[in-house]
Image (cartoon, rainbow, N blue to C red):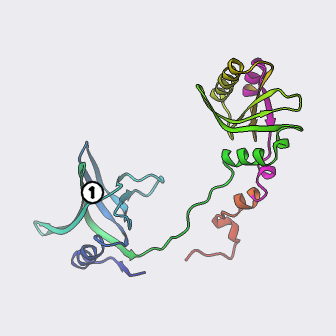
Amino acid sequence: MKKLLENPDFDEASEILDEYLKRDFTVQINGLCTVNYQGRAKSKLDRGERLVIKKQDSAILVHGPENYQPKNWQPEVDSYSVEIDEVEDEKTLVLEAKRTNPDEIVEIRFEEIELLTVHQLVDKSDLKIRGHEVDIHEAIEDDPEIVEEGLKIVERERETPAGFIDVFARDENDNYVVIEVKRNPDYNTVLQLQRYVDEIEEEFSGKIRGILVAPKMTDKILNYLEERGLEFIEVEMEDVIASYEAIDQSQKGLSDFGADYTAE
């Protein structure tokens, strides 16, 4: 932590902000403020307690006490300015974040600042998310018998006028098989699979099978499949990705630390 100021006066806060807002530091301000935005549109946030975060890539976010989404933000800021405004013995600290393309200004006017922190964060790790549809694609390619015995892969991501088929294969009877993979299939998934089957039927003779591969299925979607002569194969994510369950359980909440845990 570079700086941590509790209830700083505006002169002290202004000096710190003027130094660090323009540099590659994460700056956090908790305080009572109003927010005005002018640019492609206009918006105003009336007086309220908010958390303002300026990130090291120059982005600024204004959060309220609820909801994960910011109430106002700028993804990229070209310049910051800070000044103290005094009207009839009432002082406010005014922070302006400006963009030039397009022309936009976020003005945050603080009546009180309860906490000001400055920190230079280091994060060299990319977020790795497992358990997506691509993992099922890869698992089928590595072991086609996840779908059914005797299946042979012809092509991944085969292009058709209707789009890209996830997995194009042949079964043990040499029939062509169109495989669509979805974690959360819906009615549109069924229609898309049907379009792929129709395209392959125009290109090849013989029986063309369409299979939807998913870790779960509702009765309603299953009925849609059966009405069109399409098939469903259920796959367990734990079977597709050996570490899926461990990864899923690795994200802990406060309750996971037990009764002796105290947040500092």
As for residue 262 lying within the magenta part, the answer is no
Does residue 182 appear to the left or right of 42 in the view shown?
right
Seen in the picture, residue 98 relative to 261 is either above or below; the reply is above
Seen in the picture, residue 154 relative to 231 is either above or below; the reply is below
Write down the residue under mark 1: 34
At horizontal 67% and vertical 65% (from top left) the residue drawn is 255
* 78 sits left or right of 84 in the view: right
Q: Nearer the viewer, residue 89 or 230?
A: 230
Membership of 231 in magenta stretch: yes
Image x and y of residue 114, in percent: 35, 72
Q: Residue furthest bottom?
A: 2
- Decide which of 89, 51 is in the foreground and name it: 51
Q: Name the residue rendered at 67%, 44% in the picture.
A: 133
List x then y, in percent, for residue 231.
79, 27
| Total marks in image | 1
Q: Residue at x 69, y 64 (%)?
A: 250
Q: Residue 153 sits in which quadrant?
A: top right
Q: Quadrant of residue 125?
A: bottom right
Above or below residue 207? Residue 38 is below
Q: Quadrant of the C terminus?
A: bottom right
Span of residues in magenta: 221-243
Q: Position of residue 76 (x, y in %)?
A: 33, 57
Q: SS class of the residue under badge 1?
A: strand
Q: Which residue is painted at 37% across and 81% down in the image?
A: 3
The residue type indicated by label 1 comes to: Thr
Extreme left residue here? 88
Picture coordinates of residue 214, whole percent (x, y): 74, 38
User: Which quarter of the rendering shows the N terminus?
Assistant: bottom left
